[in-house]
Image (spheres, rainbow, N blue to C red):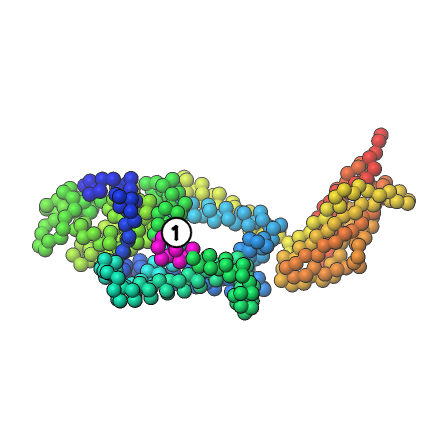
Amino acid sequence: METPDNENFRDSIGTITEEGKRAWVFPKKPSGKFYKYRKWVSYFLLAFLLLSPFIKINGNQFLMFNVLERRFNIFGFPFWPQDFHLFVISMLIGVVFITLFTVAFGRIFCGWICPQTIFMEMVFRRIEYWIEGDRNKQRKLARQKWDAEKIRKKGLKLFIFLIISFVIANVFLAYLIGSDKLIQYIIDGPFSHISTLISLLIFTGVFYFVFAWFREQVCIIACPYGRLQGVLLDTKSIVVAYDHKRGEGESGRKKFRKNEDRAALGHGDCIDCLQCVHVCPTGIDIRNGTQLECVNCTACIDECDHIMENINLPKGLIRYASEENIENKAPFKLTARMKGYIAVLSIMVGLLIGMLFLRNDIEARVLRLPGQLYEHKENNIISNVFTYKLVNKTTETIEDVSLKLMSHKGELKLVSTGDEFVVPSQGLAEGTLFIEINNSALSGDRNKIKIGVYQGDELIETTTANFLGPRSYK
C-alpha cells in the first residue's frame, strides 16, 4: 500500500493545523443512496425526539427524566426512586447494546442515530447550505471581507441557529421538568419563573455554541464514545472502509485519464479526486484507514460510488466492510466476543422483563419509629409504633386502601385515619400506625412481621417490618 501523503495521520487530528489552530471544515453537500436513507432515519428520530415529551400513555409522559424530583418515565412506564434498580438495569442494557453494536458494526451509532450528528448534519448544515451555498461558496464567503453580503448571510444563519437552539432547549427542558409544567410556565410568562428562564437561556447558549462553533469537535474531542471505538473495534468489525487493495493496485493511485489502461499500468481504481475528503463532515481522508474522527456517516461511500459510476468502474471502493473482508475476502461472522455480549444482553433483557412483570403499581414501606422500643400493655400485649409510606406509581387514585397484619395474630391500628384511606395518583400516603401482638406469639426480642396492603378485599402489595418484644431468657 502506498504511504499516505501525511505520514503523521495517525498521530494528529484532521481539524487541527500544525500550528495548533482550528482548521475549519467545509464539507461538500452529500448526496446518494445512503444519504437518502440517513435522511429518513434522521427525520423519524427528530420527530421522536421533539414529540416524546408531549406524548402521553395512560396519563404518563412518554419520556421524562426529572432528576430533581427523582421521577422518570420510560416509554410511558413511570419509575420512582424505589424503582432505581430497574432504571439502572435499563441503562446497563443500553450500554451493552451499544457496545455489541460497536464491536459488530463500528461507530455506525454516531453517524446514523446520535442526536449531535442528526442535528448537525440534517438541520444546521442544511440551513448552512441553503443560505451560504455548497463547499466552494462557503470557503469563498469565509475568505471574503465583511461586506453587506457576508454580514447578511452570516447574520441570518446565526439568527436561525439561535432560534433552533432555543427550541431544542425548550424540548430538553420538557424532558427534565415535564411538558405540562413547561407549558404552564410558558402560559405564566417567562418572568414568573426566573430560575427556569435562566436555565433555559444557559441550555440555549450551550446548544448554540455546540452547533454554531464547536460542531464536529464534539465527536472528535468531547465524546467519550469515540475513544471507546479504539478498544472495541477489531479486524472483524464492519466499518466504513477503503478497499486499499483495489484502490492502490501495485503502482498506487493515479488521476483519471480517458482511454488509459490503468490495470496494465498497475494503478488502482482510486483516481485521487479527493471527493471523499471534501464530503467528510470531520475532514478526514478515509483512505488512511479507520480513524478516531470517522463517525461512519457513509457520505464518502455515496461520493465515491458516484465517481466510480462516472468513470465506468465498479462501485464499492469505499464500503461497509471489515479489515478481514478487504484483506482475505472473509465474510462477516459472529465472533466469540460478540456471542458473549449477546448472551449478557439476553440475560439482562430477560431479567428486566421479569422485574417489570413483578413490579407492583403501589410500593409500600413500613418502618419502626426511630428511638421507640415497645410498650407492654394489659393482657400480655406488646405494642410497637410504626410509620408507613405508600407510593402510587399509576395515574389513577387508589381508593379503599387498608393495611392488615398477615404473619401474626394481632391488631393493626392506623392513627388519624379510619380503617381505609386513599393513595392519590402519582403521589403518596403516609402516616403512623400501631401494631399490637400477644407476647406469647412472639419469639425473642426481634420478630419479622408481614403486612398486607389491600384494595377492598384484594391483596395488592406486601411488606415486612421488625417488631420488638421483651427478650426471653431460658
Task: Look at the image and give the residue range highlighted in magenta.
Answer: 206-215
Would residue 74 be seen by someone viewing this image from the given angle? no
Residue 190 position in % (x across, y down): 52, 65
Which residue is disc 1 drawn over? 109
Quadrant including the N terminus: top left
Q: Secondary structure at mark 1?
A: helix
Residue 390 position in % (x across, y down): 69, 54
Front residue (pair 340, 420): 420
Q: Is 309 left, or right, of 423 in this rendering?
A: left
Q: Residue at x 51, y 45 (%)?
A: 347
Q: Residue furthest right?
A: 379
Q: Residue furthest bottom?
A: 187
Residue 119 position in % (x across, y down): 38, 59
Q: Is 58 left, or right, of 308 in this rendering?
A: right
Indicate whether 426 appears above or below 83: below
> What main secondary structure does the magenta stretch of the protein show?
helix
Front residue (pair 39, 308): 39
Q: Is 93 left, or right, of 279 in this rendering?
A: right
Front residue (pair 194, 473): 194
Q: Residue at x 8, y 54 (%)?
A: 259
Residue 91 position in % (x across, y down): 50, 48
Quadrant including the C terminus: top right
Q: Would you identify the image quadrant in which residue 34 lies?
A: bottom left
Indicate whether 364 appears above or below 442: below
Q: Is 20 left, or right, of 262 in this rendering?
A: right
Q: Residue at x 39, y 43 (%)?
A: 228
